[in-house]
């Protein structure tokens, strides 16, 4: 696998997005040819069949494997928290990173349960992004640096990459990104996040509306720079590198999907190698998935972040691969196929 390309500007990212590799057609054909031979009525395993084909196509091999899933959580702090948009102080971001590293968070338990290797990156927590109600959240150089840091963590050969985030204030960033990209009303995109309600919720919604209006125009990468955060930009970078290294991606919830949407808004098809692990109970997520034409794998009314929904969906990918690879064919089992 060649090394990642040199990237010196967001225009370089745009150029890279326009040349991303597609699925491995030979592996996809092999998966599609095996499926009708398995001892079951056609289509009877529903989306499990689709997932095994998707894995083969984007891993670039048949049979697909699910022996080495990885999860990566990026953490970042947001200057917009100064506006009172979160129920928790910004210091919680760093405290939760410590909890991840100590093994005490939900994502640690889910990774243990499903045999997922977990890594966490804290991105300059002592240097929050700028308050995007006053100007762009990041400079082009800061955005590019975060994207490249996300690209650098992707391990070639892992079976799937689960992406997630931690960052007090980042549901506000996600809502502002979606409002700027897809329009509608700020109310459509703004949810409780860590639990804001009442007057605080009204304030958060107004912040989202004002920010999207201030930073309207440009493509997805422009919006990522103006309204995103370092952890969102790093997620975008990891998605790009995963495509280059033939690693399928499981996106987590609202914030992760909002980060991903900036790529799709820049170059349609950028997320073809991605599935969405779950639909968040944040109200904007289901609306966003409609714009992305993505159907989440599960709906457990979760809104934790930290890659928890993506990790939970790894169980479905393991089931898909186990059935596709392990089931007997009609010929092997001596079972009569349909005429």
Image: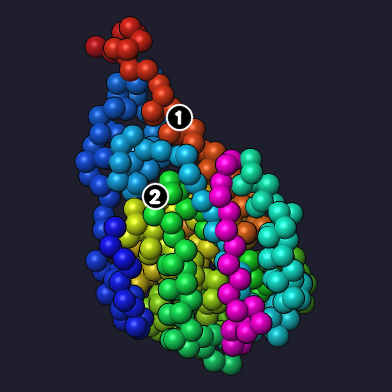
Q: Residue 113, position in %: x, y?
A: 63, 40
Q: Is 281 placed above or below 300 here?
A: below
Q: Which callout, 2 or 1, points to the residue nearer the camera?
A: 2
Tell me the chief SS of the magenta region.
loop
Q: Residue 154, position in %: x, y?
A: 44, 60
Evaluate whether residue 135 shows in this view.
yes
Q: Magenta stretch containing residue 128, yes or no?
A: yes
The quarter of the picture where the C terminus appears is top left
Q: Nearer the viewer, residue 66 or 180?
A: 66
Dividing the picture into quadrants, the one containing residue 124 is: bottom right
Crowding at mark 2 (Cα within 10 Å: few <14, some 14-19, many 20+): few
Which residue is denoted by mark 2 in the rendering? 157
Secondary structure of residue under mark 2: loop
Which numbered dot is residue 283? Answer: none
- What span is in magenta? 114-131
Crowding at mark 1 (Cα within 10 Å: few <14, some 14-19, many 20+): some
Dividing the picture into quadrants, the one containing residue 231 is: bottom right
Disc 2 to disc 1, how far (Cα)? 19 Å
Q: Is 326 placed above or below 291 here?
A: above
How many numbered discs, if any?
2
Evaluate whether residue 188 shows in this view.
no
Q: Residue 102, position in %: x, y?
A: 72, 58
Residue at x 61% of width, y 71% of height: 122
Residue at x 43% of width, y 46% of height: 159
Which residue is denoted by mark 1 in the rendering? 322
Q: Magenta stretch containing residue 230, yes or no?
A: no
Residue at x 50% of width, y 62% of height: 257
Q: Decide if residue 273 is on the left or right side of residue 223.
A: left
Q: Nearer the viewer, residue 90 or 153?
A: 153
The quarter of the picture where the N terminus appears is bottom left
């Amino acid at each position: 696998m060649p090394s990642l390309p040199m990237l010196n500007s967001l225009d370089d990212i745009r150029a890279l997005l326009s040349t991303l590799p597609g699925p491995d057609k030979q592996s996809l054909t092999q998966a599609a040819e095996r499926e009708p031979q398995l001892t079951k009525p056609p289509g009877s395993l529903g989306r499990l069949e689709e997932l095994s084909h998707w894995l083969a196509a984007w891993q670039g091999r048949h049979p697909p494997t699910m022996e080495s899933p990885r999860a990566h959580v990026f953490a970042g702090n947001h200057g917009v928290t100064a506006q009172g948009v979160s129920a928790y102080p910004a210091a919680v971001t760093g405290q939760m990173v410590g909890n991840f590293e100590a093994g005490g968070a939900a994502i640690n338990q889910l990774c243990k349960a499903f045999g997922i290797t977990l890594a966490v990156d804290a991105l300059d927590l002592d240097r929050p992004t700028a308050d995007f109600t006053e100007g762009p959240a990041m400079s082009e150089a800061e955005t590019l640096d975060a994207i490249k840091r996300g690209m650098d963590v992707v391990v070639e050969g892992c079976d799937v990459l689960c992406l997630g985030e931690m960052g007090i204030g980042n549901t506000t960033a996600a809502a502002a990104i979606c409002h700027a990209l897809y329009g509608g009303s700020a109310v459509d995109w703004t949810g409780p996040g860590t639990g804001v309600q009442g007057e605080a919720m009204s304030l958060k919604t107004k912040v989202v509306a004002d920010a999207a209006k201030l930073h309207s125009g440009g493509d997805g990468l422009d919006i990522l720079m103006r309204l995103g955060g370092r952890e969102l930009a790093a997620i975008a970078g990891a998605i790009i590198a995963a495509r280059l290294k033939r690693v399928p991606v499981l996106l987590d919830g609202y914030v992760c999907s909002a980060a991903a949407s900036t790529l799709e808004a820049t170059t349609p098809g950028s997320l073809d190698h991605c599935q969405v692990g779950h639909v968040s109970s944040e109200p904007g997520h289901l609306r966003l998935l409609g714009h992305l034409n993505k159907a989440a794998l599960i709906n457990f009314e979760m809104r934790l972040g930290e890659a928890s929904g993506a990790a939970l969906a790894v169980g479905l990918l393991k089931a898909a691969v186990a059935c596709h690879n392990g089931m007997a064919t009609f010929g092997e089992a001596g079972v009569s196929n349909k005429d």
